[in-house]
């Protein structure tokens, strides 16, 4: 084949074997979504910047490799990347990352509290796994949809205003809570290295870290039953969702659904 034909063929193949992800900001405020891929698990990354500004009502679409692993997308609130001489995690009230607007590919995970949408495509049993995680707390409502009829994962309500006092915050300039921390992150047990809230130390197995031992678990799970509300929430049956990878599902993440 001529090189032009080869190029066209490979372009077609790469398009066929990638998924389309769409991120919609349905919130009445500007947010700054971010993407992080654990490169220790796999090197395949979405074809999109690791951070961007999303105006109210805006949407972006991009392609994601069929075998994206340990990937996450979350939103950052109340960011200002200009007033900082060294933009980074503290450039936003929550969800900020190393790097500033563009999260560092190696260390740019979000600062809690942050609601996190997680994916592993082509995981065990050739299934696509996805969830909305509250393990790092909450900062924005979100929903993960797909175009193949697989279950939705979501936390569609604002968990800030009614957040239990010990977890509530951070707060914006008007005193409005833009987040709700996890009991682990809030250090309620006083010993994060060995805590039933963090499933750490002697509590680092599903058997030794039951939901009942996690403070305020029910606040998160009752309001957001289709979210991953603590480290071992799979036993709830409505935390981790899966779709056969052979369906090649496209996914939509909507903030403030
Ligand atoms: C957690 O709380 C304990 C007890 O107040 C304190 O000694 C410790 O430094 C805290 N740890 C973190 C990571 O904040």
Image: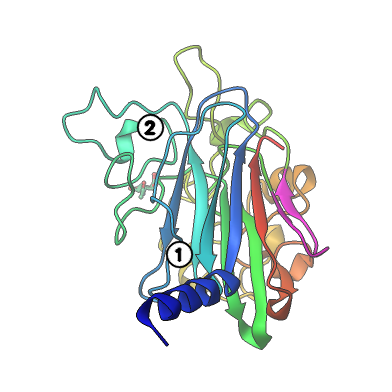
For label 1, the residue is: 194
Q: Is residue 134 visible?
A: no
Image location (x, y in percent) of residue 124? 63, 84
Q: Describe the element under mark 2 as helix, strand or loop.
A: loop
Q: Residues within 10 Å of mark 1 (few under 14, many from 20)?
A: some
Q: Residues within 10 Å of mark 2 (few under 14, many from 20)?
A: many
Q: Residue furthest right?
A: 149
Name which residue lies at 76% across and 59% down: 147
Q: Is residue 1 visible?
A: yes
Magenta stretch, residue numbers: 144-155
Name which residue lies at 66% across and 58% down: 251
Image-quadrant location for residue 228: bottom right
Left or right, 188 with reference to 19: left
Name above or below for residue 32 compared with residue 111.
above
Image-quadrant location for residue 194: bottom left
State how far apart marks 2 and 1 are (Cα).
30 Å
Query: Which quadrant: the C terminus?
Result: top right
Residue 157 inside the magenta-drawn segment: no
Name which residue lies at 29% across and 53% down: 104
Numbered circle sitting on residue 92? 2
Check whether the beta carbons of the residues at disc 2 and disc 1 lie within 8 A of each other. no
Tally the marks: 2
Name above or below for residue 155 compared with residue 93.
below
């Amino acid at each position: 084949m001529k090189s032009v034909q080869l190029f066209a063929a490979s372009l077609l193949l790469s398009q066929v074997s990638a998924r389309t992800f769409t991120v919609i900001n349905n919130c009445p405020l500007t947010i700054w979504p971010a993407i992080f891929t654990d490169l220790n698990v796999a090197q395949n990354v979405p074809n999109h910047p690791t951070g961007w500004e999303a105006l109210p009502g805006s949407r972006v679409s991009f392609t994601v490799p069929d075998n994206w692993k340990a990937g996450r997308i979350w939103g950052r609130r109340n960011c200002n990347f200009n007033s900082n001489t060294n933009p980074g995690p503290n450039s936003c009230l929550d969800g900020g990352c190393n790097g500033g607007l563009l999260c560092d590919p190696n260390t740019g995970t979000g600062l809690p509290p942050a609601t996190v949408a997680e994916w592993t495509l082509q995981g065990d049993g050739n299934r696509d796994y996805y969830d909305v995680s509250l393990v790092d707390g909450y900062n924005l409502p979100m929903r993960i949809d797909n175009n193949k009829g697989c279950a939705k994962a979501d936390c569609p309500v604002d968990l800030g205003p009614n957040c239990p006092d010990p977890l509530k915050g951070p707060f914006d300039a008007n005193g409005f809570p833009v987040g709700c921390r996890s009991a682990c992150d809030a250090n309620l047990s006083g010993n994060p290295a060995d805590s039933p809230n963090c499933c750490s130390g002697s509590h680092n197995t599903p058997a030794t870290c039951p939901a009942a031992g996690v403070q305020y678990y029910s606040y998160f799970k009752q309001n957001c039953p289709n979210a991953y509300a603590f480290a071992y929430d799979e036993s709830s049956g409505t935390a981790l969702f899966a779709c056969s990878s052979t369906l090649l599902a496209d996914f939509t993440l909507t903030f403030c659904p």
